[in-house]
Image (tube, helix red, strand yellow):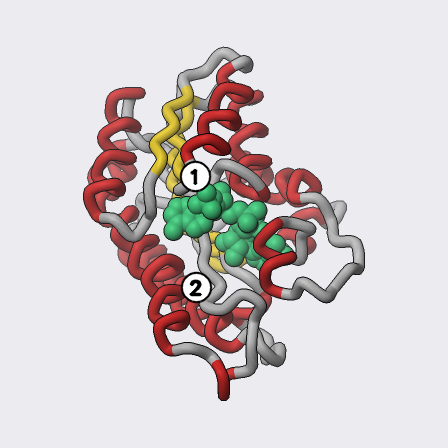
Amino acid sequence: MPVAIITGASKGLGRALASALAQRGWDLVLDARTPEALHTTAEALSAYGGGVQALPGDVTDAGHRVALVSAAWDLGGVDLVVSNASALGAEPLVRLEALPLEGLRRALEVNVVAALGLVQEALPLLRESAAGAVIAVSSDAAAEAYETWGGYGASKAALDQLAAVLGAEEPGVRVWAVDPGDMGTDLYAAAVPDDGDPRPEPASVVPAFLRLLDERPASGRYSAPSLLEVR
Ligand SMILES: NC(=O)c1ccc[n+]([C@@H]2O[C@H](COP(=O)([O-])OP(=O)(O)OC[C@H]3O[C@@H](n4cnc5c(N)ncnc54)[C@H](OP(=O)(O)O)[C@@H]3O)[C@@H](O)[C@H]2O)c1
């Protein structure tokens, strides 16, 4: 069975994607910092019959990233790495004039440095896979100038560029940066607590990710809404 490492998998998009892969028979290595929520998710997903390893930890911890890849190796290898865990840099978001530089550093460390570190760790196994792939969960804030989203958006733009270059450097591995679109999650609520408008459930965008895995288009940047359009 194929094996995926998914960061930030205890809730939100990470959990929804992990659930869909578990239902398709994938074996999973899941990460998040809060052990209780992660173990609850892992227990629920193991009911689908596949191997599910839950490793609580912070993606910025290099030793934790080694442990994630090692757990995947124990399950048979690495076919997919999903860098989904993310930091906003400020909660709620603030204009650039007030963005704490420590917050920006944290967003870059979580969203960019850790994502590359995990891929570096997994690359030898991804190259061995018959269908190796990396998904970098991006945002439209990487490409649009939304007020208050500057620090987070800059980190996602950097992630997009790492993904683009990795795709050029690794022709045997598919590398997709994916903008999932707005979703009603804890991350969105922390970013914009006053925005009470309903947002789509994370599960509603998972078919976009599954389409990438099924059709394996060229490495590049994709948006969930366009992937979900009927052909
Ligand atoms: N929600 C939106 O509208 C939206 C829009 C565009 C893009 N995105 C992107 O979609 C992805 C998923 O976000 P979401 O909205 O689903 O967020 P979410 O529901 O808040 O889930 C975030 C997950 O990441 C984990 N996490 C956060 N920091 C971590 C760290 N340093 N190390 C390990 N795990 C960490 C969280 O668990 P712990 O807190 O326990 O660690 C949780 O499992 C992110 O990349 C986000 O930037 C979201």
Circle nearer the viewer, 2 or 1: 1
Q: Is residue 17 left or right of residue 166?
A: right
Q: Residue at x 48, y 38 (%)?
A: 9
Q: Nearer the viewer, residue 81 or 146?
A: 146
* Beta carbon of the mark 2 residue lies under 8 A of ligand 1: no
Q: Is residue 54 left or right of residue 71?
A: right
Q: Quadrant of residue 167?
A: bottom left
Q: Nearer the viewer, residue 155 or 101?
A: 101
Q: Position of residue 174 (x, y in %)?
A: 40, 46
Q: Which mark is residue 34?
A: 1
Decide: is 201 above or below 20: below
Q: Which mark is residue 201?
A: none
Q: Pointer 2 and pointer 1: residues touching (CB < 8 Å)?
A: no
Q: Position of residue 152 (x, y in %)?
A: 48, 69
Which residue lies under the disc numbered 2?
160
Q: Are there few (<14), some (14-19), or many (20+) residues within 10 Å of tag 2?
A: many
Q: Are there few (<14), some (14-19), or many (20+) residues within 10 Å of tag 1?
A: some
List the single residue furthest toward the bottom: 97
* Beta carbon of the mark 1 residue lies under 8 A of ligand 1: yes
Local secondary structure at mark 2: helix
Q: Position of residue 226 (x, y in %)?
A: 67, 55
Decide: is 118 above or below 191: above
Q: Position of residue 57 (x, y in %)?
A: 33, 40
Q: Residue at x 64, y 57 (%)?
A: 189
Report, in whole angstroms, how far the alpha carbon at label 2 lies from the one at label 1.
27 Å
Q: Is residue 60 visible?
A: yes
Q: Residue at x 65, y 65 (%)?
A: 192
Local secondary structure at mark 1: loop
